[in-house]
Image: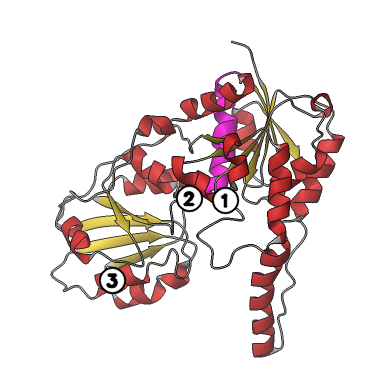
């Protein structure tokens, strides 16, 4: 089989624990396993050497990200108000500080002398794509690769799961980069709703992928306690566990259960965990360890996104461990279904179609097909 020279450009990469870091890392590993030549361009990071020792990946460092949102440590309530405004408005209005990636990617690509067969840029954040676009020529022979695929886990301008839409001028930037790219890879069939119609012909559905064999499924504890879990982030009004936790903590003590929550956003859960020992809060843990822990539980919980353009990648994880999935719509809590699950009735679990499509070898093959098309 002809070997392909692949360049992956990403912000998140091993050993970071995030959906986009998993995307970049799993793709790089599988391309290597299939015998292709893989280069990864990303910000410098500590503790990457174990991966580079195991896999022959060429790591091209973008250096350290230095831009930070200025935080005021003084001025009491005024300082706190300023910090809240700065943390919200600077990313929203200027994509700051992640806009630093635009300049770093553009500069590094213009310095790079190597040639590749395919370039895959991975967002979020979207300045990764913008940096590639800034160095991309309409004359194909001048580019670092003949094919550029922009991998988009979530939409940008037409996203549904943030409180505020990006300002209108980012629409010009999104359309500018999408005119240049050859393909836009998205995770699900319904993802097209998050993108401008004039670019729908460039969309290719390539889901998140993992190596199923990496997960060691374990036996659970049969002691009469129903154990279930959730792992991931929370967001006010969109991915908010409050209604579910309020319902669970008001159930009679005769309901023997443990709801284990693994998250970096502890503030959403802390008061419920203090109120009820059945709610157990954990810090976020590495993905494989998390899945092996979930495999011992009776079922797992997914908080539904708003709309249909974005699908949580954790559903793929849940398909790997083959556990019933309780889907929770934070805005419309179906308490009868929750009680069914607590009583071992999973007839209303959500189905995850064709789990084989999420095997990483199948995912990589879909990228390789685009090289030939």
Queried whether the magenta region covers residue 102, the answer comes back as no
Q: Residue at x 16, y 67 (%)?
A: 255
Task: Report if residue 44 is visible in the image.
Answer: no
Majority secondary structure of magenta residues: helix
Q: Quadrant of the C terminus?
A: top right
Q: Residue 344 at x, y = what percent?
A: 15, 53
Q: Quadrant of the N terminus?
A: top right
Farthest-out residue, front: 198
Residue where numbered disc 2 is placed: 309
Q: Left or right: 134 with respect to 324?
A: right
Range of magenta residues: 17-36
**Residue 33 got which mark?**
none
Do the residues under discs 2 and 1 have CB atoms within 8 angstroms?
yes
Upstream in the sequence, badge 1 or badge 3? 1
Q: Residue at x 29, y 62 (%)?
A: 259
Q: Residue 250 at x, y = what percent?
A: 23, 76
Upstream in the sequence, badge 3 or badge 2? 3
Disc 3 element: loop
Q: Residue 37 at x, y = what percent?
A: 67, 22
Q: Nearer the viewer, mark 1 or mark 3?
A: 1
Q: Residue at x 49, y 62 (%)?
A: 264
Residue where numbered disc 1 is placed: 155
Could you give the CA–CA distance between mark 1 and mark 3, rounded to whole angstroms?
38 Å
Do the residues under discs 1 and 3 have CB atoms within 8 angstroms?
no
Q: Where, by quadrant of the figure, is residue 147 drawn?
A: top right
Q: Left or right: 279 with respect to 158?
A: left
**Residue 277 got which mark?**
3
Could you give the CA–CA distance between mark 3 and mark 2, rounded to whole angstroms?
36 Å
């Amino acid at each position: 089989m002809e070997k392909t020279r692949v360049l992956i450009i990403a912000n998140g990469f091993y050993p970071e624990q995030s959906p986009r870091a998993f995307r970049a890392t799993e793709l790089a590993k599988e391309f290597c396993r299939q015998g292709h030549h893989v280069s990864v361009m990303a910000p410098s990071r500590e503790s990457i050497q174990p991966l580079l020792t195991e896999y022959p990946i060429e790591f091209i460092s973008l250096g350290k990200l230095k831009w930070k949102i200025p935080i005021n440590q003084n001025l009491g309530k005024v300082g706190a108000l300023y910090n809240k405004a700065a943390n919200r408005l600077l990313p929203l209005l200027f994509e700051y500080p992640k806009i630093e990636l635009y300049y770093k990617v553009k500069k590094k690509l213009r310095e790079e002398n190597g040639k590749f067969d395919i370039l895959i840029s991975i967002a979020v954040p979207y300045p990764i794509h913008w940096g590639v676009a800034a160095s991309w020529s309409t004359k194909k022979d001048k580019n670092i690769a003949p094919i550029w695929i922009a991998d988009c886990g979530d939409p940008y301008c037409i996203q549904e799961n943030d409180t505020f839409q990006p300002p209108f001028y980012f629409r010009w930037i999104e359309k500018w980069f999408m005119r240049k790219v050859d393909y836009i890879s998205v995770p699900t069939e319904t993802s097209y709703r998050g993108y401008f119609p004039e670019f729908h012909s460039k969309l290719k559905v390539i889901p998140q992928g993992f190596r199923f064999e990496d997960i060691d499924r374990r036996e659970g504890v049969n002691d009469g306690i129903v154990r279930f879990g959730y792992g991931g982030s929370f967001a006010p009004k969109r991915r908010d566990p409050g209604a579910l936790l309020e319902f669970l903590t008001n159930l009679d003590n005769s309901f023997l259960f443990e709801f284990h929550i693994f998250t970096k956003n502890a503030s959403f859960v802390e008061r419920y965990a203090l109120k009820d020992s059945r709610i157990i809060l954990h810090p976020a843990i590495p993905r494989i360890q998390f899945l092996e822990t979930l495999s011992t539980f009776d079922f797992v919980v997914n908080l539904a996104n708003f709309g249909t353009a974005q699908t949580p990648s954790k559903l793929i994880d849940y398909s790997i461990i083959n556990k019933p999935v309780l889907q929770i719509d934070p805005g419309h809590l179906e308490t009868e279904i929750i009680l069914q699950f607590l009583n071992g009735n999973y007839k209303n679990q959500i189905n995850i179609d064709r789990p084989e499509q999420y095997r990483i070898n199948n995912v990589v093959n879909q990228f390789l097909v685009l090289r030939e098309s």
